[in-house]
Image (cartoon, rainbow, N blue to C red):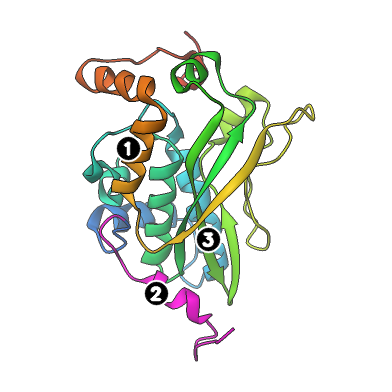
Amino acid sequence: MAQSKDDLPAEAERYVMPSHFVESDSLEVQSFVSSALRELPAEASSRDKAIRLFEAVRDDIRYDPYCFALDEESYRASRIAGAEAAFCVPKAILLAACLRAVGIPAALGFADVRNHLNTPKLQELMGTDLFIYHGYVQLWLEGKPYKVTPAFNMELCERFGVKPLVFDGYHDALFHEFDEQDHRHMEYVNDRGLYFDAPMEEFLVAFKKTYPKLEEFNRVRISKDSSGYDSGFSKEGTS
């Protein structure tokens, strides 16, 4: 594989630039990055910055699959940076933007995964345990690629008995196949590849086709208020 003079794989060079959704140059993303890195020394390495940004997106924005916007513009990183909760796709978009903002190449990745630890309410709305277009990020450190997903915050992992995802800067941080009781947790069934920008039109069309009941639920949620509908993903974890 070709390497640039900065020891960056040729395939990664394009993933340092901002894009329509991965707005690494936006003030909101820059502010999120500054807050996340405020305790790191000025001479901190790219690896240290990547670890801290992963942790910030993972834990500062809690995971909630019901925070599902139906319009494309809600998936811009500048909008996501101020969110209290989000699901895997916007969290991956934000992490990619944060990494690019500090000069770390980051691509968006999407995969279809089978989640064996779904809540009954969410599975009823989805009609399946297959999550299409699960969002993750592939970043490059010292020319080496790593795949990470910042979706599940630590508190949620503890609540569900799921092994937390920790990025140490040297290994991938993707969903574990089994939970802490060795029950099957997550199964990757189809990797859709890497993207420079989020394919939101394609994603929303597929979502509406695959999950019509969940789409209708979200239309009601957006027009009204569904907070507390599913205690499994609520802020406090209680109904």
Graded by Cα atoms within 10 Å as few (under 14), some (14 to 19) or many (20 or more), the crowding at tag 3 reads many
Which residue lies under the disc numbered 2?
A: 14
Q: Amino acid at mark 1?
A: Ala
Q: Residue 131's spot in the image, x, y percent?
A: 51, 35
Q: Residue at x 54, y 36 (%)?
A: 152
Number of labels in the image equals 3
Mark nearer the N terminus (1 vs 2): 2
Which residue lies under the disc numbered 3?
A: 138
> Could you tell me how far apart the alpha carbons at marks 1 and 3 are, in whole angstroms?
22 Å
Q: Residue 21's spot in the image, x, y percent?
A: 29, 55
Q: Quadrant of residue 31?
A: bottom left
Question: As drawn, is 33 to the left or to the right of 233?
Answer: left
Mark nearer the N terminus (3 vs 2): 2
> Could you tell me how far apart the alpha carbons at marks 1 and 2 are, in whole angstroms?
27 Å
Q: Residue 215's spot in the image, x, y percent?
A: 33, 25
Tell me, yes or no, whether the two marked residues, 1 and 2, touch with CB atoms within 8 Å: no
Q: Amino acid at mark 2?
A: Arg
Mark nearer the N terminus (1 vs 3): 1
Disc 2 element: helix
Q: Quadrant of residue 3?
A: bottom right
Residue 83 is labelled as: 1
Q: Is residue 131 above or below residue 213?
A: below
Q: Is residue 198 magenta?
A: no
Q: Residue at x 43, y 29 (%)?
A: 65
Q: Is residue 6 magenta?
A: yes
Q: Is residue 197 above or below residue 174?
A: below
Q: Residue 30's spot in the image, x, y percent?
A: 30, 58
> Which quadrant holds the N terminus?
bottom right
Which range is magenta? 1-21
